[in-house]
Image: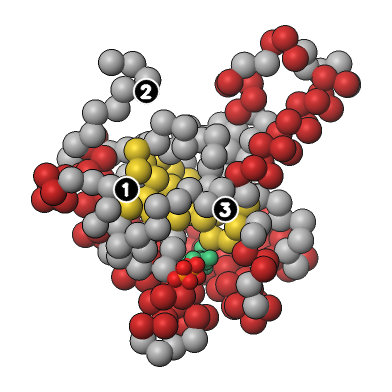
Amino acid sequence: MALFSKKMAAQTEVDFSRLPRHIAIIMDGNGRWAKKRGLPRTAGHAAGAETFRTIATYCKDIGLDYLTVYAFSSENWKRPEEEVGAIMGLLKKYLLEAIAQMERDRVKMEFFGDLSPLTPELRELCERTREISRHYEGCQVNICLNYGGRDELVRAARAFAQDCIDGKADPNHLTVDRFGGYLYSQGVPDPDLVIRTSGELRLSNFLLWQAAYSEFYITDVLWPDFSKEELHRAIAAYQSRDRRFGGV
Ligand code: FPP
């Protein structure tokens, strides 16, 4: 296990009265999980989608306020067509199920990313889930879809510049908080904890602005094998950290 000490690894006791408000997850390792079993990569993504369901439901049940997951990056289009199609198919399946259960679960769904290159059907499903759940007060699940952190920042800068041209904003009055209002994540607090599975020590263009002061938890566990117990270890590690936000 990388990046955290034996002391932290040993501590798995979670204090549920002190949960992080917002957990963000880079769900990595689906391909390796499949390869280890002699299966096609798409089988890894299907298993990963199941894990996502389990973890999202559990996060709602324990009362987490926000969960953000990296489902498809703006760079993932470079993957074989069949694999991209399989991931989009899994998303469609998930959204259809989510819509059917929305009244019961009251999970609020949001999407971070440029949805315009998605199929009209998938875009419509995203819009519908967002619309139905707009007023729900349960856990908010943000699915990053065709998302890239740099792209998000450039879009925000462009939108701000346009507001300046239109006389709606003034460069001299730009603050960190105001700039945050131009991001996909507007209104959502920054992630307290970022989890990455499969042992990679990279941010991979995920929440570049929002993760400025996030605590990181990296585990060697591949995403399809990620469990509630591993989530507990991540939260316990987070709870053992001393967050100083640049102070002493
Ligand atoms: C990274 O593993 C995973 C992805 C790029 C796709 C994540 C998609 C899902 C979990 C399924 C659909 C999601 C939802 C929300 C229903 P990788 O393929 O890069 O793994 P590797 O590094 O082992 O090759």
- Residue 190: assigned label: none
Q: Secondary structure at mark 2?
A: loop
Q: Amino acid at mark 2?
A: Phe
Give how far apart the Cα atoms at labels 2 and 3 are.
Answer: 25 Å
Q: Extreme bottom residue here? A: 38
Q: Secondary structure at mark 1?
A: strand
| Mark with earlier residue (2, 3) | 3
Residue pointed to by mark 2: 245
| Mark with earlier residue (3, 1) | 3
Quadrant of the image containing the C terminus: top left
Instruction: Name the residue: 88% across, 21% down.
Output: 165
Q: Amino acid at mark 1?
A: Tyr
Instruction: Name the residue: 72% across, 9% down.
Output: 172
Observer-nearest of 61 and 245: 245
Q: Vertical placement of 31 versus 216: above or below?
A: below
Residue 29 sits in quarter: bottom left
| Mark with earlier residue (2, 1) | 1
Would residue 70 be seen by someone viewing this image from the given angle? yes
- Residue 15, position in %: x, y? 17, 40
Residue pointed to by mark 1: 217
> Label 2 crowding class (10 Å Cα cut-off): few <14, some 14-19, many 20+?
few
